[in-house]
Image (cartoon, rainbow, N blue to C red):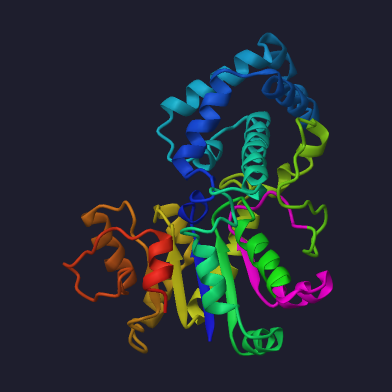
Amino acid sequence: MKKVFVLGAGTSRDFGFPSGMELMKEIHSLWNHPGEEEIGNYMGTTEQVKMPSQLQHRFAQSAEQKIKGLSHRLYFSGADSIDDFLSQCKDDVDVQFGKLTILNVIFEKEQKAKEFGDGTLFKWEENWLRVLFGEEFRFDNVEQLKKKLESEQFYFVIFNYDRCVEHFLYTAIQNYYGLEGQDTKDIINKMRFYHVYGQLAPLEWQPENNPIRFGDAFEGVFDELYRFVPNIKIVNKDRGDIEKIKDTISAQIRDAGKVYILGFGFQDSNWEMLGIDEYKKYRANGLPWPPDKFHYTNFGLSKRRRERIREKLFGLTSHGTDSAKSYPDDPTVYEFMHHDYT
């Protein structure tokens, strides 16, 4: 069986990472009162982009004024995320600086999540990743895990920039079974991780170029940080890359036996990335929609919003009821994984 996990910001929030709105608020605050690091990053971005046609305008305003102007625009833009806002920015310096700011904020959150403590990635209590590991990847011995991964496929479609899921699973598998690095790589590489809008950087055990370990800090070194800017993908700016991954994601969801949509906000732009509406049209004249294919959490969603989700999915609510008028208490991702994951 193929299992696909669609993971939104809610899946990382318990580990100290911001939701889409919280990230936008945090960036607005940084830009509204830019310090030396923000000003230095903006000036460095201007030098990197090197757009002669804009040099005259750029010298007319200080970097601090430009950053405060971005903050003003962001607040009054009506955007529902920083990605949404940057997708409409026409100045490439602003776009690249925005990506750089995202990197700075999320790298800092990763650094905190790596530390020991109650709010970190490996915290003991209410940790849905611990539950997932126990349900799917914890066996009496590693040979049983290998055998399972030969018969079942795991795909993670991640709408976050952070690398919490892959880092947790790699680290847990390595430490639980007492494996060497290469043995752990051989196991984890049987899974697939797709970051819809890019990620900070590959982890050191992944095959891509320019890897960086989870939780490493840059301490404001511009050149070190700027090399990761192309990893962040923005709609309207990196459309080609996003369309490619959209096709891949749609195919995986279409072929999956189970799809778990967790911590997801169900914004229209993100929903379209999953390709479920196209799949519904494809299935309309064929086999009936599998009643237990889709499972999802609905924490914080209004009754009307949940009704719209049911109309789109024809699936189960997070607690497994098939009644369109019955809505249980909002379950968190942890509660769903702990009580209702099947």
At horizontal 61% and vertical 56% (from top left) the residue drawn is: 164
Quarter occupied by residue 31: top right
Residue 304, quarter of picture: bottom left
Residue 170 is situated, as x and y percent measured from the top left of the image, at 69, 67
Residue 312 seen in the figure: yes
Residue at 54% x, 64% y is 129
Count of labels in the image: 0
Residue situated in front as seen by the camera: 171 or 268: 171
Which segment is the magenta one? 177-203
Note whether residue 251 is visible.
no
Give x and y (percent) for residue 116: 64, 49
* Residue in the picture at 51% in, 81% down: 255
Front one among 169 and 61: 169
Q: Position of residue 62 (x, y in %)?
A: 67, 11
- Is 327 part of what is drawn in magenta? no
| 215 displayed left or right of 4 | right
Above or below, 204 against 71 in this view is below
Magenta stretch: includes residue 182: yes
Say which quadrant the C terminus sits in.
bottom left
Q: Residue furthest top?
A: 60
Where in the figure is residue 48, as x and y percent of width and height? Answer: 79, 31
Residue 333 lies, with reference to residue 52, above or below; the image says below
Residue name at image x 45 percent, y 70 percent? 260
- For the residue pair 120 and 73, the one nearer the viewer reads as 120
